[in-house]
Amino acid sequence: MATPHINAKDGAFAETILMPGDPLRAQLIAETFLEGAEQVTNVRNIFGYTGSYKGKRLSVMAHGMGIPSASIYTTELVKDYGVKNIIRIGSCGAVTPDIKLRELFVAMGASTDSKVNRMRFHDHDYAAIADYTLLRTVVDTAAEQGKKITVGNVFSADLFYGVQPNMLEVLARMQVNVIEMELAGIYSVAAQYGARAVGILTVSDIIPTGEATSAEERQTSFRDMMEVALDAAVK
Ligand code: HPA
């Protein structure tokens, strides 16, 4: 049955789904990497597709930007469409000097300034974490492909503009390596509804210095991330 934000038929999604933020990126992934991909939902132009990769059924759908948007789509996918494994593929800004432009990062945990997990958790501090099996599969896959990947803590920020400079110091001191905007929501949705989730990120900018990847570099690091995500998804 369709949900308020997804108009796919029952059974239209595979058990495993790759989720970028951007709907056009979902379309590009479906067209470039999946065999026999069919578009299964298009509400609000948040496109979703199901096809196969290396003989295994696989879906891809955008989750939009920010915790509220990502929480809506992941909740409906898990609760109403039976999705079991969510792999977010996105970008992040680095805040600690050990993390460099274009590198791959996998989020073991997600800290946040959002209140969503306090709302879920009787105002206590929920530790939003990746599913260990998925995390390990991602790390093993990157190693098999000879790619460097850093495992660490992300900050899922509600503000893209206006993160306070002293917050960057706090993040670095607490060894929170990168900022993105969704995983603290996605990890807790997965926990709440009984699915597994992991987030793989490419470093698109270094926040303290303002350094950013060129369009060409973004393409290369995107391809590196996709090779890891696709192989991990079908293991
Ligand atoms: N902030 C939040 N999300 C991001 C950033 C950032 O600086 N860069 C890439 N995703």
Image (cartoon, rainbow, N blue to C red):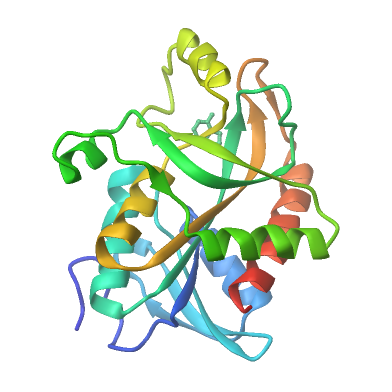
Query: For the view shown, which residue lies furthest in the left direction?
Result: 122
Q: Where is residue 138 in the image (x, y as percent from the top left)?
A: 64, 61
Examine the rendered structure and indicate whether residue 78 appears above or below residue 44: below
Q: Which residue is drawn at 58% across and 74% down?
A: 30
Examine the rendered structure and indicate whether residue 74 appears above or below residue 230: above
Q: Position of residue 154 (x, y in %)?
A: 51, 36
Nearer the observer, 105 or 62: 105
Quarter holding the N terminus is bottom left
Examine the rendered structure and indicate whether residue 25 appears above or below residue 123: below
Examine the rendered structure and indicate whether residue 49 appears above or below residue 91: below
In this picture, residue 186 sits left or right of residue 226: left
Q: Residue at x 28, y 46 (%)?
A: 68
In this picture, residue 50 sits left or right of residue 201: left
In this picture, residue 174 sits left or right of residue 234: left
Residue 145 lies in quadrant: bottom right
Query: For the view shown, which residue lies furthest in the top direction?
Result: 166
Q: Residue at x 67, y 15 (%)?
A: 209
Q: Position of residue 169 (x, y in %)?
A: 54, 12
Residue 6 lies in quadrant: bottom left
Number of callouts: 0
Query: For the view shown, which residue lies furthest in the right direction?
Result: 146
Residue 110 lies in quadrant: top left
Q: Position of residue 17 (x, y in %)?
A: 48, 71
Nearer the observer, 202 or 61: 202
Nearer the observer, 15 or 124: 124
Q: Residue at x 51, y 21 (%)?
A: 171
In this picture, residue 170 sits left or right of residue 63: right
Quarter holding the C terminus is bottom right
